Image (cartoon, grey):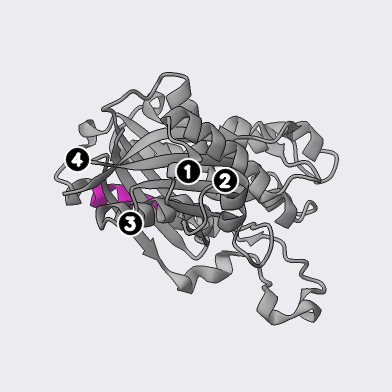
Amino acid sequence: MIYSQILGTGGYLPERVMPNSELEQWVETSDVWIRERTGIESRHIAADDESCSDLALNAAQQALAASGISAEDVDLIILATSTPDQVFPSTATRLQQRLGVPAGTIAFDVSAACSGFIYALDIANRFIQTKGAKTALVIGAEIFSRILNWEDRGTCILFGDGAGAVVLGAADQPGIISTQLHADGRQESLLNVPWGVSQGYEALQGVHGKVTMKGNEVFKVAVRTLGQLVTDTLQTNGMENSDIDWLIPHQANIRIMEATAKKLNLPMERVVSTVATHGNTSAASIPLALNVAVRDGRIKRNDVLLLEAFGAGFTWGSALIRY
């Protein structure tokens, strides 16, 4: 059997930090209100001249350096994003060129909103297991600030920009133990950007391609769905709650993260949380959180990690990993 293992991690956050106090100037909200309901204190915002591939490039370079793998040895790039540089070519192929990854390498984007990194990780794992690739670069990168309505306090307070990356390599022992992916398109109306290229530019008028969300409904579905996902993941692998060393959830809302930790009977000290200073960076949130905990020494080799995410679609998924 061939397995895949995380060889290195990387992350990048734009220089500009936007505290909650800045949002008080634009919408009817307050620092206290945001902290109490989301756990968010600040978020990073991309500069006007920064693109999704810029963020991805920085995270990918850091992951490659950490893994000791050169760009020339990468034979698969999967980039999860809802905010690509352009319609086509994919941001992954633009990243391929900028990194100096050889021509002929497989490179493509994945769109699964906040679950995108888990989807991309699953696909890369399957490539490696089936000998379609030996070394994969998996990235989550988002500039969500470009699709926010800054007059909608229900959404503009939540999101930030950033990128996270991992390098996966073939191994003879399981690194990625299992993954689970799910979707339910019937819930589209609760969280979406209600415009797309195929609708034509006339349809953009009045909608402006911005995120819309029914926050309370999304919260309820997310808590219920992620709780069941945790149970299913452990049962599928014959594991107990106590077998998990670290929970690395999608950084959407501290209350959702606390509910998932409670389901695992895991103290919050064993939950990697970056939501306070990152906000919700969508597909980038899990790899960013993983990178933070690896680099500050909390996560060590052989630790068992449970990654889980929930996003628009709805999409949701988990990855059980021995780091």
Nearer to me, 120 or 217: 120
Taking the magenta stretch, the answer to whether it contains residue 230 is yes
Question: Would you say the magenta stretch is mainly helix, strand or loop?
Answer: helix
- Give the Cα distance between marks 1 and 4: 23 Å
Give the CA separation, mark 1 to mark 3.
18 Å
Q: Amino acid at mark 3?
A: Phe
Earlier sequence position, callout 4 versus callout 3: 3
Which of the two marks, 1 or 4, is nearer to us in this view?
Answer: 1
| Side of 310 where 265 appears, left or right | left
Q: How far from the left and from the top, in percent, is residue 274?
A: 54, 32
Amino acid type for the residue under numbered disc 4: Asp
Q: Earlier in the sequence, mark 3 or mark 2?
A: 2
**Discs 2, 4 touching: Cβ within 8 Å:** no
- Classify residue 6 by image quadrant: top left
Q: Which mark is residue 127?
A: 3
Secondary-structure class at tag 1:
helix
- Pointer 1: residues within 10 angstroms few (<14), some, or many (20+)? few
Identify the residue at horizontal 51%, vertical 51% (top origin).
102
The image's mark for residue 72 is 1
Numbered circle sitting on residue 93 = none
Q: Secondary structure at mark 3?
A: helix
Location of the C terminus by quadrant is top left
Residue designated by label 4: 172
The percent position of residue 290, horizontal first and vertical second, equals 45, 34
Please tell me whether mark 4 sits on a helix, a strand or a loop: loop
The reply to whether callout 1 and callout 4 are in contact (CB within 8 Å) is no
- Label 1 close to label 2 by CB (< 8 Å): yes
**Mark 2 neighbour density, 10 Å: few (under 14) some (14–19) many (20 or more):** few
Instruction: Using the numbered discs, state the Cα–Cα distance from disc 4 to disc 3 in whole angstroms.
Output: 15 Å
**From what the image shows, is residue 213 above or below residue 74?**
below
